[in-house]
């Protein structure tokens, strides 16, 4: 494992890591974590290990204002997350190899879908429990919506921690047209989703699938939870991505 930093979309230093397999990698994966999570969340580590065991190198990083990255989370939004992804790709191009595969979990998957059309080197995209409509995330702070819009910001509790959400975040997610981005990316797509996901409903997987061009595939995660907290579920996803992606890279 190699730790490094790169400059993000807002000029801050973002914390990242490269996990490499033994020998020469079969390909490089860029992984985007879920909303308010970090690159070191349990599921990301398990998926990375499975990809490493199958010969893939994996880069993951903390979005601006999260984990070990610099910056203020309150000043970020979905657009800045997509831009952070682009900055990560630029760093990989210059210092290792461009990503062959883009993988995103939850809102990180939505960000990957939005960014993919502008990353020509990537041949395959995989999403895990991702929203088909970015505005879906607003339900997490619906009780504070009026306060945010009237006062310009509010502190909300997400995954047991306080985060400041600003009006600009809500305005930004309303402007996203993810279905158009999905239709334009023209890459192989694998959609992972659990039918009983109580954070992002299964109808999101259906909408992403319908918006995408072929080749596209859907894998049901059965009784897995949204964060893939069961290590077997996370390893299953990592192993499937590795074997599926080889066909395209």
Image: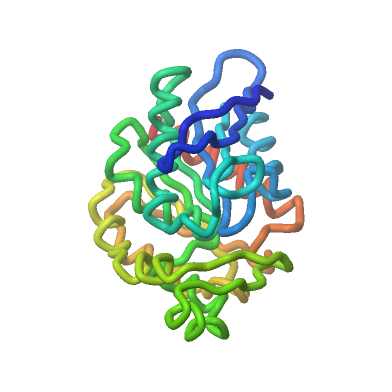
Residue most extreme to the top:
23
Residue sitting at 50 percent across and 29 percent down?
Answer: 6
Locate the C terminus by quadrant: top left
Locate the N terminus by quadrant: top right
Q: Quadrant of residue 224?
A: bottom right
The answer to whether 225 is drawn above or below residue 139 in the figure is above
- Residue 206 is at least partly visible in this image: no
Circle count: 0
Residue sitting at 60 percent across and 58 percent down?
Answer: 36
The answer to whether 3 is drawn above or below residue 118 in the figure is above
The answer to whether 40 is drawn above or below residue 229 in the figure is above
Residue sitting at 64 percent across and 30 percent down?
Answer: 52
Q: Nearer the viewer, residue 27 or 105?
A: 105
Image spot of residue 115 (x, y percent)? 35, 47
Image spot of residue 15 (x, y percent)? 60, 35
Residue most extreme to the front:
151
């Amino acid at each position: 494992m190699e730790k490094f930093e790169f400059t993000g979309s807002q000029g801050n230093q973002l914390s990242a890591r490269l996990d490499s397999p033994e020998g020469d990698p079969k390909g490089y994966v860029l992984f985007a974590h879920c909303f308010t999570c970090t690159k070191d969340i349990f599921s990301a580590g398990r998926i990375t290990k499975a990809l490493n065991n199958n010969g893939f190198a994996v880069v993951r990083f903390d979005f601006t204002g999260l984990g070990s990255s610099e910056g203020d989370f309150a000043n970020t939004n979905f657009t800045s997350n997509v831009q952070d992804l682009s900055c990560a790709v630029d760093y990989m191009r210059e210092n290792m190899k461009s990503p062959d595969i883009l993988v995103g979990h939850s809102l990180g998957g939505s960000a990957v879908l939005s960014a993919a059309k502008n990353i020509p080197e990537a041949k395959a995209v995989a999403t895990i429990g991702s929203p088909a409509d970015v505005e879906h995330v607003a339900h997490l702070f619906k009780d504070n919506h009026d306060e945010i819009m009237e006062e310009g910001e509010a502190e909300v509790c997400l995954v047991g921690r306080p985060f400041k959400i600003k009006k600009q975040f809500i305005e930004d997610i309303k402007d996203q047209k993810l279905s158009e981005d999905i239709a334009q990316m023209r890459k192989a797509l694998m959609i992972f989703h659990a039918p009983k996901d109580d954070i992002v409903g299964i109808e999101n997987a259906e909408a992403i699938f319908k918006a995408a061009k072929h080749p596209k595939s859907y894998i049901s995660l059965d009784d897995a939870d949204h964060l893939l907290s069961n290590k077997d579920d996370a390893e299953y996803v990592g192993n499937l991505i590795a074997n599926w992606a080889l066909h395209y890279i």
